Amino acid sequence: MRCGKGIAGLSYSMISPTQTSIESGIRSVEDPQLCFVGQEQPIMPIEIQDHKPVVEALRDREQELSQLINMVPSHLWRLTPEGEPTFFNKRMVDFLGLDVPDMDRRGKSRLEMLVETVHPDDAAEFRDTLNRCLVSGEHFTMRYRLRRADGLYRWMSSRAEPMRNHAGRIVHWYGLCHDIDDQMHAEEALRRSQQQLQQMIDAVPVRIWSITSLDDPVYFNKRYQDHFRAVIADFEAIEDPRIETLLQELIYPEDAPEVQRTLLNCFESGRGTVMRFRWLEKDGAYRWAECRVEPRRDQDGTIVQWYGVSLDIDDEVRAQEALRNRERELSLLVDMVPSNLWRLTPEGETTLANKHMADFLGVDLQDKRQLAVVFDTIFHPDDVDAVSDVLGRCLKTGELFSMKYRLRRHDGVYRWMSGRAEPLRAPDGGIVQWFGLCHDIDDQVHAEEALRRASEQLARATQAASLAELSASIAHEVNQPLAAIVANSQACHRWLSAAPPNVERAKITAERITRDANSAADVVSRIRALFRQAPQTRSSEDVNHLIGEVCRLMADGIAAKGIRVETDLEPNLPPVALDRVQVQQVFLNLVRNGVEAMDGAMVDGARTLQISSRRDAIDAIRIEVRDAGTGFEHAERVFEPFFTTKQNGMGMGLAICRSIIESHGGRLWMANNETRGATVAFTLPLKASESS
Ligand code: ADP
């Protein structure tokens, strides 16, 4: 008898055919030659002395073994040397829904029936392998799918070994197969997830590497390997590539030492890092990359692996660089533009001033606090109210800001500026910020002022010249009757002094004196009539509009003298038929007189020129120019031709004004104010008249 290890690790003993067999000792096993032994001692041939107890013992034993075989959680089977099944344990019968005897009823061989229980995809291999083993006597080992009674296939791991007789001939094949379906599915799922992971690692547009220690070869994902293959000629020849060697090949020479240092630091300190460097591409160009390195630690915190992810950030870096250059260019442009640029919040707080403006004001651009209050201190005291009024209105309404004002330069000098600002709006219409620009027009203002003074002087000179001409002709006209009056007076004197006095002749001479005096008076009347009877070119005009024009014309000159103009104009006044140029001259003259009366060191307090227009009760429009100047000193003489208290005055202004207004059917008069200054007023009738 031979003993050996068998299926499921059970010991079995074999009884040779010559030994006494125990008849149907193990019926369900159907083979008296095999006994399975659960205990250590093998079953020995039993000498039959007392037949009954032995049979009983054998039956118990048989039952025990049968139970064991059927309960073992695997399929057990036995084949003939030719591969015909001769035994299935109960589990296998239950699984297949088929017992060995059932296999004989189908007209096929048992082996064929057995092969049919195997999945069609595995059947050919199963048959071939089994046949090969049956012929060669090799162990049969295979994984295949076996059909369950309900038609479902489950993976089995099967193994069979031959049992030989003493002559070495195979007498049986004993097989075992156990259900590994769950394990196979788990392995399959694992394989699939590994595959997916690998695919993902290869597909993600990043290059990934990992190492266990610095001396170990590096793992590179496919993208990395492709990259190396593309740029390193003999990459395939490098066995066990080390990270340092490869980085040297790949990284821009200037960046390589820093990368190496950072990596070493990182490995030494055990802390991850982020590096940026340029790497070589297959076209020979270098591109920017960002590499993030992180350690993986086990439960004890020991580093077991290092991972690195490298990303191509070249486009991003170049875009950032381009953006930085653009920003530099724009800020250079903003700073170099020869004008002052500024930005305000919708509430009016300064958030930016260009270099030009900062240099002009002498403020530090970096000092946000200084910038925020800068607008409170830089305006000329006379302009600050006007600017804050206008700016405040614009911030509230969103209107464009545009005005002239004086700004204090860093050296304390005020210079005229022309400022403009526009709001930047969000798509919903709300104001996001205000952008403003102001440029220095001081030289221009002074040039204009000089020009204005020059043209004024010229006008005066022209006036003086024409006046000289006029005076000459008046003198000539008046001279003749005056000379005649003088001659006739003397003659009259002589006639009356004669003895006896020649009264008759004296009377005639006196009549001549009267005639000549009348003729002199006529000359003067004719001159006055000159102004009154000037050709009438009247048009229907809006007086307020006319006032506005004159104010604008004189605005710079008035402001330059530090005088404020306040207007109080009644809206919707009816138009008046008038000679536009003449009335403009009147108004211009009155404004200039008012300004000149306030222009001087003697006048202190607010220098305000108030101009008003309103409809008068007598169906006329009344215009007043009220100043805060010196007031009239010789009110009774101001309409006398050539009366002036000014050094360069001509003394004809008010006289001419009155003539013009009267020629329009209106009236012109003046009076000193109760407190300070004087008011000159005139009326223009609404119905055009041709007063003489
Ligand atoms: P001119 O301005 O050339 O002197 P006008 O006829 O316009 O000639 O004025 C005559 C004078 O009247 C002035 O010299 C000045 O003394 C006085 N005058 C005119 N307007 C005013 C005024 N608004 N306030 C004080 N005095 C004035």
Image (cartoon, rainbow, N blue to C red):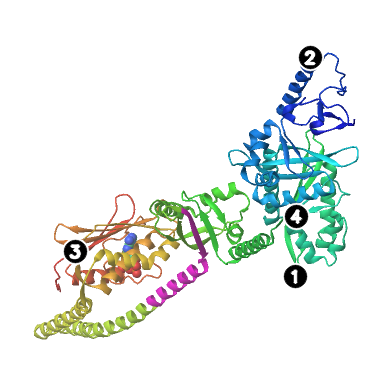
Pick whichever, 219 or 56, lies toward us: 56
Q: In this picture, is 174 found above or below 574?
A: above
Which badge, 1 or 2, is on the more N-terminal residue? 2
> Which tag is nearer the camera, tag 3 or tag 4?
4
The residue type indicated by label 1 comes to: Asp
Q: Nearer the viewer, residue 27 or 69?
A: 27
Q: Residue at image x 86%, y 26%?
A: 20
| Residue at 75% from the left image edge and 70% from the top image edge | 283
Q: Report x, y in % for residue 181.
A: 67, 40
Report if the CB atoms under discs 1 and 2 are less than 8 Å apart.
Answer: no
Q: Report ligand 1 position as a quadrant.
A: bottom left
Per the image, the residue denoted by label 2 is: 52
User: What amino acid is at disc 4?
Assistant: Asn
Q: CA distance from mark 2 to mark 4?
A: 76 Å
What's the residue type where badge 2 is placed? Lys
Span highlighted in magenta in the image? 432-460
Label 1 – label 3 distance at C-alpha:
84 Å
Between circles 1 and 2, the one closer to the viewer is 2
Q: CA distance from mark 1 to mark 2?
A: 96 Å
Q: Residue at x 68, y 53 (%)?
A: 199
Front disc: 2 or 4 = 2
Residue 221, disc: 4
Q: Main secondary structure of the magenta part?
A: helix
The earlier-in-sequence mark between 2 and 4 is 2
Residue of label 1: 283
Per the image, is 452 magenta?
yes
Mark 2: C-beta under 8 Å from nearest atom of ligand 1 = no
In the figure, is residue 419 to the left or right of 218?
left
- Packing grade of label 3 (10 A; few <14, some 14-19, many >=20) is some
